[in-house]
Amino acid sequence: MLVVGGAGAFGGRLVAGLIGTTDFDVIVAGRDLRRAERRVAEVGSARARALRLDTATASAEELRATGAFVVIDAAGPFQGADYRLARAAIDAGLHYVDLADARDFVAGFPLLDPAARAAGVVALTGASSIPALSHAVLDHLTAGWHRIETIEIAISPGNRNSPRGLSVIQAILSYAGKPVRVFVGGAWIRQPGWGWPIRRDMPGLGKRWLSLCETPDLDLVPARFAPCQAAIFRAGLELSSMHWGLSLGGLLVRARLLPSLLPFARLFRWLAERLKGFGSDRGSMVVEVAGIDAAGIPARAAWSLVAEAGDGPAVPTLPALAVARALADGSLSQAGAGPCVGMLTLDAMEREFAPYRITTRIMTSATMRPSPFQQLLGDAFARLPEPLRGLHALSTDVVAEGRSDIAAAKGFLPWLICRLSGLPAAGRDVPVTVAFHVDGQGGEFWRRRFAGRRYASGFSVGTDGHAGLLCERFFPFVFFHSLTASPEGLRWDLMAWRLLWLPLPRWMMPPTVCFESADGNRFVFDINVRFPIIGQLIHYRGWLERK
């Protein structure tokens, strides 16, 4: 096995896995021979040797001379990279595998398919956490399903052991603040890279911040699984200061004050090294899917992985290890070039987890927590009209549509508040769409669209001093509501609020009143928001029906 970048953050772990769990001879290759030799010394095996190899000039003859059976590219970054090494491997008659996470690189890789078929070799890109592992999980979770509504993938590494190689940081900075094309609400839209932040519960870790990332799965998941509503990939940094620092940097790109954050890669790396001792060494990955299962019943399923004691960075290398093993034993032999999806089962990949402190589990609708409304209202939940119970007791994602009449205050300040927050503009009989996303951990996320205006917020059960209240995160604010259920409907009363983590005084708090009721099968809403001094801000009422 020839591992290019075998002395790097991920390549080094792949080399250790190959030496420790297989009988393969391993060549650790890279531009810096001394670094490769140090890695070989660390491995301490006679089956490993070092080789100087520059991917920018590598030829078929050079690769063939190594005597390798498979070329594995773990160097990166793959953003903006060409296919020189892959072409050279194919021309040399060698199998090729890489750990690419770059959207454009993976999307263009099938161009090599004719050459790979002609050479009789397998060439696979993205043999990593995404798309290889994520798609193996989705294949397993959705086997036999009739329809898929939403898919969400999230990764949150631990800070202490998070890879800090320059190529890793460059990969993230390449899209931070730039428009990312993503399938949401049944349509393709653009959102800022490392934007669209949410705070969600990562099983086994607690709540962490996540933001939109540009990855191959944003294309491959819609193409392979055809979700009706959404396919989202998010990732996050464990330390809030690092996560939001990168987000703020992205704002400079969004505002076109900077063309890119890439020139600051070494600075970001230096800062990351200074914060290396904070946080934890525990990371997690989650893959969630909602839709109609094989029995024709609305369903939700989630697979989660927790890596303990610094073993998280090994996860992106394990799919490549499984592929190398399959190429060697002949179970993977169909010649051609393309993304590493649908090639190996989830069981085959999870067998590679055995030497590590990695645990996984699968949750289904039957084992997931009830909605925050059910948790807070308890027995009183049954008093609500049926349309309210239907939308507040979801086990899978749902989209509802309707109409609304909106009265908004005049004046510059009310207009500015509504505009910046995405609250709807004044109008009559305005079309409304609300996408309800449940996370399976007792939380929900609502994406609302009033004609051309969009805004979103997340809901969970309040904790500590806000126990018994509904927590609504409407960035950058956090609101805490009391809920009162009756046969007439559900009343929300705002009791406290914060700006991020800073409690705000009650005298400044907008006395917001929300009342939900029913009109036949329709879910009816009436929301009135006022501010001290400013007065009336917005009052909108309308109805929704599930699609």
Image (cartoon, grey):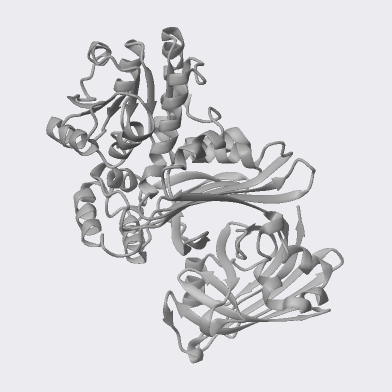
Tally of marks: 0
Residue 120 spot, x, y in % from top left: 44, 10
Occupied quadrant, residue 221: top right
Seen from this angle, which residue lies furthest left?
Answer: 34
**Which one is in front, 86 or 67?**
67
Q: Is 150 situated left or right of 484 in this image?
A: left
Residue 457 spot, x, y in % from top left: 56, 66
Image: 358 above or below 450: above
Image: 527 above or below 431: below
Seen from this angle, which residue lies furthest right?
Answer: 520
Occupied quadrant, residue 537: bottom right
Q: Residue at x 48, y 35 (%)?
A: 132
Occupied quadrant, residue 500: bottom left
Q: Quadrant of the N terminus?
A: top left
Residue 30 shows in this picture: yes
**Which one is in front, 299 or 170?**
299
Q: Residue at x 24, y 36 (%)?
A: 43
Q: Is 109 situated left or right of 344 in this image?
A: left
Seen from this angle, which residue lies furthest top?
Answer: 118
